Image (cartoon, rainbow, N blue to C red):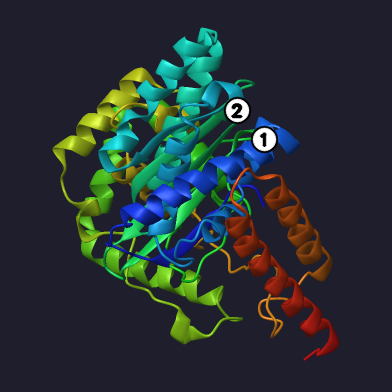
Amino acid sequence: MYRGIATFGLDYGKCPAWLFERMVKLGREMARVIIAEYGPEEFIKRIADPVWFQSLGTVLAFDWNSSGLTTILTAALKQAVQDEAQDLGIFICGGKGKTSRKTPQEIENWANVLRLDASKTNNLIYGSKMTAKVDSALVQDGFQIYHHSFFFSRSGAWAVVQQGMNAANQTARRYHWFSKDIQDFVCEPHSGIISEIKNPTINLIAKESAKVRTLGAELIKNGYHSLMKDIQILRKHSSSLHKMLRLRINSASSKNLTFLKLENVEFNHHPVEADDFSKSRYLEKILWKLCDEKPENYENILAVAGVGPKTMRALALVGEIIYNAKPSYEDPARYSFAHGGKDFTPYPVDRQTYDRIIETMKKLVDKMKIGFSEKQRIQTKLLNNYKSTKYERSNPL
């Protein structure tokens, strides 16, 4: 899996300086060896794999199930490679909070240093902006994006690692993207999605939401006055429609959780809000702008400056209530683990893959230019994992 979503506990703590310094040092050695062995494009591809990314964070000695793993690991890698970026062939932009908003400028700065042509630079910046917009406006799962990191190589291959938080249930969810796997930004661009909880979601990137996307573009092309007539109908019956949609979302979410323990599922977020049907000058202003510019398709609508979750939700609600074009309400997150579970949950351990990964990691550690004691510590971890796997073979459940 090369891009996806992971859910963790929301951690407000701070990484101690001594740990961060060691993560930078070890992360630099890991990057050097992996790139020397497999090339910069393969490093980008692996960063886009949520399980591999999680494993890298664990190897660098950070909390395995904390939201901080994402922010601290990307910060450590960014610092680790910045002085050797041109030699290594990988470039890391963005980060947490305000730093995330500097990503396009950082991409442009590196493009000037590398003398990339305008077309390649624009593609990189577009990829950064669209991944952020899709995960905030088309996957309305209750997580607000606050971290965005963009990894790319000279060839134009890129990966995005971004994270959103849900303050209500104190969790964070990570979203991964890989450029070479994207066929369509607005139709299931994610794969390999992992999560611990499910949320009621308006999932506008699902294949099942294709009619909603097509109709959304048509509504804009039909003009502002025609669209506002439909919205006025929703406003007239706002109270009953809001109750009906909340029930429909909860029903759709619960129906897809029959194989899970319900005590592990939390429904603290309702993507349809009470004010979705109320008068909004900003919404009307954006809809006027869209109808005036007439974007060619759904992706182009999303790309327009100022378009966000409420705009896309308004178009989806008009499509569902007035024209019976129902979006998917299934959370795209999936339950998964790196190698399976010893209790066969959610599936048996994939032993061949497990062994191959352990041998690969041992090979990479041997090539690192770090002290013997540090190598021995990492090798001991890997050996313990290997013994655990052998124990499972001899003691099947």
Q: Which residue is mark 2?
A: 88
Indicate left or right for 346 with 304 as reference. right
Numbered mark located on residue 35 in the image = 1
Residue 61 in the image: state x and y as whole percent.
49, 61
Residue 176 in the image: state x and y as whole percent.
53, 47
Numbered mark located on residue 124 in the image = none
- Secondary element under disc 1, as helix, strand or loop, is helix
Indicate left or right for 167 with 342 as reference. left
Q: Is residue 218 visible?
A: no
Crowding near pointer 2: few (<14 within 10 Å), some, many (20+)? some
- Secondary element under disc 2, as helix, strand or loop, is helix
- Label 2, label 1: how far apart the Cα atoms are: 7 Å
Quarter of the picture containing the C terminus is: bottom right
Indicate left or right for 1 with 159 as reference. right
Pointer 2 with pointer 1, Cβ within 8 A? yes
Label 1 is placed on what type of residue?
Answer: Ile
Residue 369 in the image: state x and y as whole percent.
63, 43
